[in-house]
Amino acid sequence: MNLMQLLITVVTLGGVYSLLSLALNLQLGYTGLINFGIVAYFAAGAYTYVILVQPAPGEFDSYVFGFGLPVWVGLIGAGLAGSVFALITGWPCLRLRGEYLALTTFAFAEVLGSVITNADAITNGTLGFTNLPQPLENLVAPQDYSKLLAAMIALIVIIVYLVIRRITASPYGTVLKAVRDDELAASLAGKRIQRLRLQSFVAGAFISGIAGAIYTWYTTVASPGLFSADITFTVFIILTLGGIGSNLGALIGAFILIGFQEVVRGLATNPVVAERVGSVVVALEGLMFLLVLRFFPGGAAEALTRLRFRLTAKRRGRSDAGQNPDSGTPVLAASGDGSVG
Amino acid sequence: MLQYAVFGVIDGAFLLLATLGFALVSRVHQFLNIAHAELMSISALLTWWFSGGLHLPIWLAALIAIIVVAVLGLGIGRVVYEPMLVRGPAIMLIVSVGVVYLIHGVTEGIVPPGIKSLPLPDLPTIYLGSVRVTVYQLIIVVIAVLSFVGLHLFLSRTRVGTAVRAVSANRELARVRGVDVERATRYVWLIASGLAGLAGVALALVSTLTTDLAFEQILLILSVSILAGLGSIYGVALSAMIIGLTMDLSTVLVPSGYRTAVAFVVIIAVLVFRPRGLFGRKVRLV
Amino acid sequence: MSLPIDVEGVSVQFGGVRAVRDASLHVPAGSVTGLIGPNGAGKTTLFNLICQVLPPTSGRISIGGVDTTGMTMTRCAAMGVARTFQTPRGFSGLDVRNNVQVMLPDPRDSFLGALFRPGRGSDARARANELLDRVGLRDVAEQSHDRLSGGEQRMLEIARQLALSPKVLLLDEPTAGLDLPHQDRLRQLILDMRDQGLTIFIVEHNIGFLMRTVQYLHVMNLGEVIASGEPADVTRDPRVVSAYLGRGADAIARA
């Protein structure tokens, strides 16, 4: 197993997932919205990008649309597609409590999945689109392209990370957290709860849409089989591992999980084992997920913060390690008593 | 047309069986245990393995499978779910996703691929007028009805059942009043998982088994439960019938590939317009 | 600036139980008024009614002369009614200062504001610091909410309500869990707030505290208001003494 190959895959695929994870962090970590339909916004972005960017259909193609627009238009279109779908699906159900919102977003995502599979004229049905062009592919030799792609994705991830950080570090981010922690108190303080939740939901979907477009750069294929509920749950596992509420944790979680998947796949050289390796990975992910949820709710981000405090405390000779202002994971803390008096 | 209606009733009976255990847990512990269907899957696969692989008589295979699944469900309930209950129903839903991954990964890893079905004796098909049913389908209906009645009797006539009802109404109050909460919750896990096991056997009686059946089942279970109203056990009977009939009668109009679509439409429609379902208590929005 | 509260013939029923029956009382604007009564008397329910957590089944509530019966909680809060709870509530994921600061209006707390004007320090932060000074929590401003003691969380809750510049403040058992020095501090804060023009209405079990703090006192028992007036008179009222008989009667006797 080639270390360079591993690194490239982790950066590329991990990069795509870290965008999804950042989006979920905004929705779940900061605003308390359980979005079980992430894959839908991802898929909407991917397909919209492909439709915008690919050339017009030839005489043997069964699909109808292809506009041949430049990549950056495709990316924006992808983000908008995610946002529009989020507006449609979010608006009726954002007032619902946690697990009800989860189920509704999940149901909407499956409906979109059905639509994608069946709307042949637009999406080319179960076949989907193949042989997709990759941006800047003419710039380097084919064997070096994966490195260029990884670099491009890394750049995009960094930009998105910085933008999200700016948003969440501002008073707006604090208001979102207040809405998450005590919606009643926040609304009595004059905050427009539904508007804030919708904004967070749509912003996260925008990023998920862009992630979808970027995903097609990596896979060069867009078909319904790629976009299953598995992706949604993988993002949840990633964010949990990294630390719900922490943007850096979103990135860390993505790289850890994708790295883990690739390492395990690489180790399974025996063909009998290789067949089962998928299930083993799934089982281990489930186990890790449960362990982190139970014992390390702050995820990797909290572990790192604790470590940093302990190290600096030693240097300063103080013993108040563990102090954690603006704790990142009250989402996982004991649910408060929401009753009034 | 009548044939479809009969299929609808049979499917409804099966859904009732599958959802009863789920509804029990959701009522008592206030959360949605997505892993319920995985237990069904385990039970079906165990029954297949014991009867097909180890050549045990089917009834014995089924019995052992149900017991195994009941105990497994109890274990998961005590070890994984109960310590996390304080975190709230939303987190519990996420936790159950983790359990699904764990169980699914293990099951898929152990079970050989390929289509499996139980080595069942060929029993005659019965004709009621123009309608055709197999004996196995009738067995399912009977099991479903017996389970429903049995659960009702358990909850209303036995001491433990009364304790369970007290705990589901108000856990702390029950504890203060001297109800043995630990014992009651143990029974809840056992019975709910046992029902899942029974549903798994029922499934194995009429269809071929794949490792993915849990996913489709849980969607239907969720829609039945949501339509009835989360927390409602008796309402599940009605909503299971409604969904069973809708699924099968709709194949008259719509290609049969859309069966699961019915589940989604129900979930969305109910949660958006009447979150408490038919019989549930008023849902506090957040 | 401050507003009076008028409760007229208010009743509310839960199932078969009438938690509040035909209760009437008046809280003068700018006063510090107390509400006492044995457990289950309906005091917190009355607070809930005044804040429109639930509507009364009969009767009328008005604040500053405006009929607020049946208003939504948010509208009632917008009128200037603030309230604390028996179990202190706060934003558990935020630190102390942010808990207060988030209650203040801020031009940067919109999505676009966050993207384009995220700069640090504005008068929201300074104002939050001021409020923390008033309740004595300035030195723990950076601490996470969950690390505060119960008494500190209570004071923080008061600071958060003050951030809304209310005209009426309802305090639900504010001294529970406070030691004597903190109780003195709380009293000082209450009197300060009154001097700044707030109407303060307090539900308490700690009768000694109220006697030294309030100008008027109401007593409830079994859902009814059984006495109202100046503290010294009310506590000698035989109905009040018998209501407390066997339930801390000596607290009344000592008061």
Image (tube, rainbow, N blue to C red):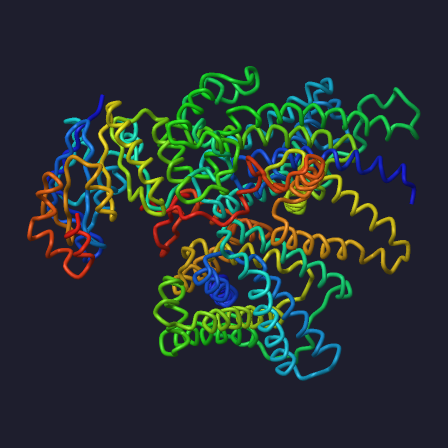
Spot the residue most to the left. C238
Q: Is residue A286 left or right of residue C133?
A: right
The structure residue drawn at horizontal position 56% and vertical position 41%, both measured from the top left corner, is: A35
Q: Is residue A286 above or below residue B153?
A: above
The picture quadrant where one finds residue C5 is: top left
**Residue C227 visible in image:** yes
The x, y position of residue B45, in whole percent, is 68, 69
Quadrant of the snapshot with the C terminus of chain B: top left
- Residue nearest the observer in this picture, A271 or A22: A22
- Residue nearest the observer in this picture, B284 or C103: C103
The structure residue drawn at horizontal position 93% and vertical position 30%, both measured from the top left corner, is: A143
- Residue nearest the observer in this picture, C223 or C156: C156
The x, y position of residue A214, in whole percent, is 73, 29
Q: Is residue A41 left or right of residue B25?
A: right
- Residue nearest the observer in this picture, B235 or B13: B235
The x, y position of residue C113, in whole percent, is 52, 18
Circle count: 0
The x, y position of residue B242, in whole percent, is 43, 58
The picture quadrant where one finds residue A215 is: top right
